[in-house]
Image: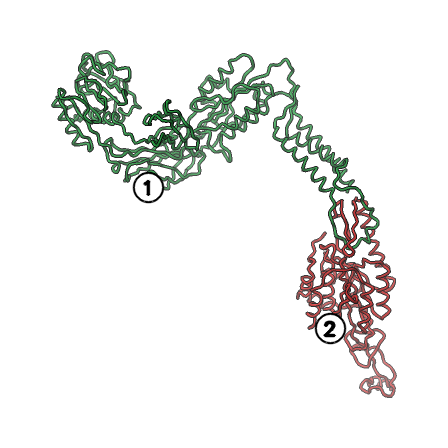
């Protein structure tokens, strides 16, 4: 049988006892009072006792008892009646640390509400119960391993903060379930999240206690900033588009500020209907830089009120084409005329020695070794040798699948038929992957292989682009694919990137020196020279990675509509957190003594009043 | 305790007493029962004294040679064939003497503002007297060289600012010199009249009685006004443990006040006032304990008429 307090913070009020005693001593000190005459005071006996001495005093004793009873009642003591034979339990708390938990609900954020509920829950647990705390972020992290040190758990709980990414609740709950699988104690898993129970995977709905937080849907977000700029296009001719979405079920107003690096381009006020999207085109960009879009709104979630995009500088591309096919030469010549800043040099295969300073070398039907100092593109390599070995050609090729996220396939319509041409059956080297897969004569074959080797990017296309097919109006996709490939093969090295939050960015453009990484919230990390420089973009904003004067900037944006849509679905009304004491059979069971102590205080009150009245 | 309009600032209290709205109220008041022995003509009717001319017919008397023929009642001569002359109620000036105790006890408790209230009350009484043609002189009973400080004798309301100028700088200081002050004042004036003594009378009762007897012996009508505030009347506001300091002598007394002690003090204060009242009543001296917190209007319109001082 143990005694514990549901609200131990109330004992801080015990300091009032010192105040009470100080008041008592102050009351005992004599105050000087001027009277007109002592003539009428002669009948009042002179007091001789020393004023500041603490003497036994019934009134003081009663007041102290009254104050103690009130403080003890506020501390909400519970007499736990568990018998010794009953096994102590274990509680695994999963705290959602996703971006939407940063949404403000009144004065506190959802995360703070959840933390407070969890704190109260921790305080209510019996002292011998084990607790475990898991923070659900992009990856789950065990903040507190199973322990009976509740104070340490509270300290750790106070230190955790949400991130600007979505949370992988499934992974976090799986970790919790593994902890629950230990059979030494009865274990319960509790989830503190703004994710409604019905949106959890079916496995969790009946086995996890959910303490929901969050109600408001008041959020405006920048859904995305897209810069439309061709690979070879001058930045002053590029344009951008900003999409702002109102996730609230009421009209919203705000101001959108657009800036290129630190120069403000324009500010636009806007109103958006409930659950609607507004588009803001941006024209007349003055030059290259980081296009910053930010919202000035008073909404619940701030992390999605800014976004970034890169306006790339002009990058001329020098392409060396090693081919003796007249049709390909003619087609590429016409392409070069149409595309500014694309400089094409033709070399006969017999005359090829090296890259000759080109950014990209295009090999047509030949398979020389990878160039040492340039990127390369092998078009229909004809031999079963070289970096991209190939076998017999196939006819009637169709596209089966492609890596949509790969930049080389951007803007392509994979469902359109390919030109009626032959394709080589490529064999992917270990360092390359199949980016575009096709089918011919009943079997699959890679149509596009991409990879990096020796610090340069290389690719191979199975289709033979000879002849006039590049400029055929019915196969524009091939031209787009080729330009995308040029773009990907010779990437810009301007040291600035824009990534979504939650991604891990590898920074490989740094000298082999110790790196210093500063995150958007002021955190700083030093990484050794021998480890790859990694930016774990958990927070929205600008990361700066520097090594001996070389700096790479990584802008992380929370462009996640699911996290920005912080409102509850209509079918899932807000549920108040269940009372921890009633939510679980493992919760402490015992007699609350708070009411009894409050009653004692009420009984002491008239006694104290009578004592005070008697004195005065 | 009702809020008082008075603070310890005597000058402010005197300004309050000279405010036109209050003066309009005072215009309706006059002193009652004045039995002046002054020989100077005035406007105050004097009981049991007649004069040959006047406004109020007192009696007829047989004509004796030498009487002014203008006063012969010719109607009576025609009707009764008797020569009689009319006599009228004598009207004299009734000097008002204002004796204001300015000892330190009048300044304590400060919030009771006894001295300020007394000064304001004196200013009001002076206005009433001057408005009815009676001369006024004020004296501050203080522990000065001869026990009192005098204002000029005023005979016209236009000189009231001189009285205000006399009263405004007064402050509570020194010990109570009631008897010595009255002695000194009587040496300085030869005009019997109405004497209003404003004091807390916190002296040996025999001293106060002696002073009253002296005034009465010189033919003055005496009125005793005792400003008594709530803080002085009741010790309930005092903390439990106090060191009392006599405002005049500086003597100290440590006491621990219980409810019984507070009741005992209140009883002693009530007995002190009752003794004064009874003693004055036995000698035809009007007495009133006035509360500064009630305000000047209440005192002048209710308390003093109730005590038979004003009407």
Q: Examine the image and state in which quarter residue A289 appears.
A: top left
Who is closer to the viewer here, A471 or B249?
A: B249
Q: In the rendered image, which quarter is residue B182 located in?
A: bottom right
Describe the element under mark 1 as helix, strand or loop: strand
Q: How busy is the neighbourhood of tag 2: few (under 14 within 10 Å), some, or many (20 plus)?
A: many
Front residue of this view, candidates B253 and A213 = B253
Q: Quadrant of the C terminus of chain B?
A: bottom right
Asked if B124 appears above or below A9 in the picture, the reply is below
Q: Which label belongs to residue A265?
A: 1
| Left or right: residue A111 compared with residue A393 | right
Q: Colour of chain B?
A: red
Q: Colour of chain A?
A: green
Q: Position of residue A23 (x, y in %)?
A: 70, 40
Subunit of mark 1?
A
The spot of residue B220 in percent (x, y) is 83, 69
Q: Is residue B280 visible?
A: no
Q: Nearer the viewer, residue B112 or A160?
A: A160
Which chain's residue wears label 2? B
| Residue B219 spot, x, y in % from top left | 85, 71
| Quadrant of residue A559 within the rendered picture | top left
Residue, far left: A326
Q: Residues within 10 Å of mark 1 (few under 14, many from 20)?
A: some
A48 on left or right of A381: right
Q: How many marks?
A: 2
Whether discs 2 and 1 lie on one chain: the answer is no
Q: Is residue A196 above or below residue B255?
A: above
Give the spatial CA distance, label 2 vs label 1.
Answer: 88 Å
Residue picked out by circle 2: B154
Residue A237, how many percent across, how many down?
Answer: 25, 37
Numbered tag placed on residue A572 in the rendering: none
Numbered disc 2: secondary structure: loop
Colour scheme in use: by chain
């Amino acid at each position: 049988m143990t005694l514990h307090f549901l609200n131990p913070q109330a004992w801080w009020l015990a300091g009032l006892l010192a105040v009470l005693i100080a008041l008592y001593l102050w009351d005992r000190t004599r105050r000087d009072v001027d009277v007109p005459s002592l003539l009428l005071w002669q009948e009042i006996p002179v007091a001789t006792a020393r004023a500041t001495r603490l003497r036994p005093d019934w009134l003081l004793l009663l007041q102290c008892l009254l104050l103690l009873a009130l403080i003890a009642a506020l501390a909400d003591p519970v007499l736990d009646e568990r018998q010794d034979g009953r096994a102590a339990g274990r509680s695994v708390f999963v705290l959602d640390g996703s971006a939407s938990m940063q949404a403000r609900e009144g004065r506190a954020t959802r995360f703070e509400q959840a933390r407070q509920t969890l704190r109260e829950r921790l305080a209510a647990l019996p002292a011998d119960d084990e607790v475990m705390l898991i923070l659900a972020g992009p990856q789950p992290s065990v903040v507190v391993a199973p322990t009976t040190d509740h104070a340490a758990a509270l300290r750790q709980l106070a230190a955790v903060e949400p991130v600007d990414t979505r949370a992988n609740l499934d992974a976090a709950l799986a970790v919790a379930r593994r902890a629950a699988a230990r059979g030494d104690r009865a274990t319960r898993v509790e989830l503190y999240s703004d994710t409604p129970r019905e949106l959890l995977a079916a496995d969790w709905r009946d086995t996890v206690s959910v303490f929901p937080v969050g109600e408001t849907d008041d959020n405006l977000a920048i859904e995305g900033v897209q810069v439309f700029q061709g690979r070879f296009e001058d930045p002053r001719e590029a344009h951008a588009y900003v999409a702002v979405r109102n996730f609230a079920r009421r009209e919203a107003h705000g101001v959108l500020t657009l800036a290129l690096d630190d120069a403000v381009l324009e500010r636009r006020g806007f109103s958006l209907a409930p659950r609607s999207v507004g588009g803001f085109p941006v024209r007349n960009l003055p030059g290259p830089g980081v296009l910053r879009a930010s919202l000035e709104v008073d909404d619940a979630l701030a992390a999605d009120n800014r976004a970034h995009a890169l306006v790339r500088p002009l990058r001329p591309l020098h392409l060396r084409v090693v081919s003796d096919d007249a049709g390909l030469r003619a087609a590429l010549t016409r392409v070069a005329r149409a595309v500014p800043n694309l400089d094409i040099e033709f070399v006969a295969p017999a005359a090829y020695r090296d890259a000759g300073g080109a950014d990209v070398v295009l090999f047509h039907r030949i398979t020389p070794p990878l160039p040492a100092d340039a990127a390369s593109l092998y078009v229909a390599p004809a031999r079963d040798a070289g970096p991209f070995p190939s076998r017999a050609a196939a006819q009637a090729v169709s596209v089966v699948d492609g890596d949509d996220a790969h930049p080389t396939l951007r803007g392509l319509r994979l469902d359109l038929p390919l030109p009626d041409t032959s394709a080589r059956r490529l064999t992917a080297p270990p360092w390359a992957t199949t980016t575009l897969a096709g089918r011919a004569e009943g079997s699959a074959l890679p149509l596009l292989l991409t990879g990096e080797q020796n610090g340069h990017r290389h690719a191979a296309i199975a289709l033979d682009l000879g002849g006039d097919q590049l400029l055929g109006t019915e196969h524009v996709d091939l031209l787009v694919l080729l330009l995308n490939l040029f773009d990907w093969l010779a990437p810009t090295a301007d040291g600035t990137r824009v990534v979504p939050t939650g991604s891990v960015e590898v920074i490989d453009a740094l000298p082999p020196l110790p790196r210093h990484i500063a995150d958007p919230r002021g955190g700083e990390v030093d990484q050794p020279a021998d480890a790859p420089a990694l930016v774990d973009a958990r927070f929205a904003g600008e990361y700066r990675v520097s090594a001996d004067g070389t700096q790479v900037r990584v802008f992380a944006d929370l462009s996640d509509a699911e996290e920005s849509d912080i409102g509850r679905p209509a079918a899932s009304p807000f549920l108040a957190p269940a009372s921890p004491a009633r939510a679980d059979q493992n919760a402490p069971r015992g007699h609350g003594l708070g009411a009894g102590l409050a009653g004692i205080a009420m009984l002491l009150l008239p006694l104290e009043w009578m004592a005070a009245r008697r004195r005065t | 305790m009702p809020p008082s309009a008075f603070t310890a600032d005597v000058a402010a209290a005197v300004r309050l007493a000279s405010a036109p709205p209050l003066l309009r109220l005072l215009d309706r008041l006059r002193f009652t029962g004045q039995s002046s022995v002054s020989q100077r003509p005035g406007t105050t009717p004097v009981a049991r004294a007649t004069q040959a001319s006047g406004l109020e017919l007192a009696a007829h008397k047989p004509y004796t040679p030498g009487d002014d023929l203008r006063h012969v009642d010719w109607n009576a001569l025609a009707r009764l064939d008797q020569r009689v002359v009319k006599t009228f109620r004598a009207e004299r000036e009734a000097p008002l003497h204002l004796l204001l105790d300015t000892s330190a006890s009048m300044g304590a408790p400060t919030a009771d503002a006894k001295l300020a209230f007394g000064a304001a009350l004196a200013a009001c009484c002076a206005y009433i007297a001057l408005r009815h043609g009676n001369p006024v002189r004020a004296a501050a009973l203080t522990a000065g060289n001869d026990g009192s400080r005098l204002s000029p004798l005023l005979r016209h309301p236009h000189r009231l600012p001189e009285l205000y100028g006399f009263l405004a700088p007064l402050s509570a200081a020194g010990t109570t010199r009631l008897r010595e002050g009255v002695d000194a004042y009587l040496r300085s004036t030869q005009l019997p009249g109405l004497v209003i003594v404003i004091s807390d009378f916190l002296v040996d009762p025999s001293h106060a009685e002696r002073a009253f007897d002296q005034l009465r012996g010189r033919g003055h009508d005496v009125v005793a006004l005792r400003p008594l505030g709530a803080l002085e009347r009741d010790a309930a506001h005092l903390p439990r443990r106090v060191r009392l300091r006599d405002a005049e002598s500086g003597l100290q007394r440590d006491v621990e006040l219980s409810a019984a002690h507070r009741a005992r003090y209140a009883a002693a204060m009530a007995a002190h006032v009752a003794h004064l009242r009874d003693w004055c009543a036995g000698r035809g001296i009007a007495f009133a304990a006035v509360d500064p917190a009630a305000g000047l209007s209440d005192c002048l319109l209710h308390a003093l008429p109730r005590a038979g001082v004003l009407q």
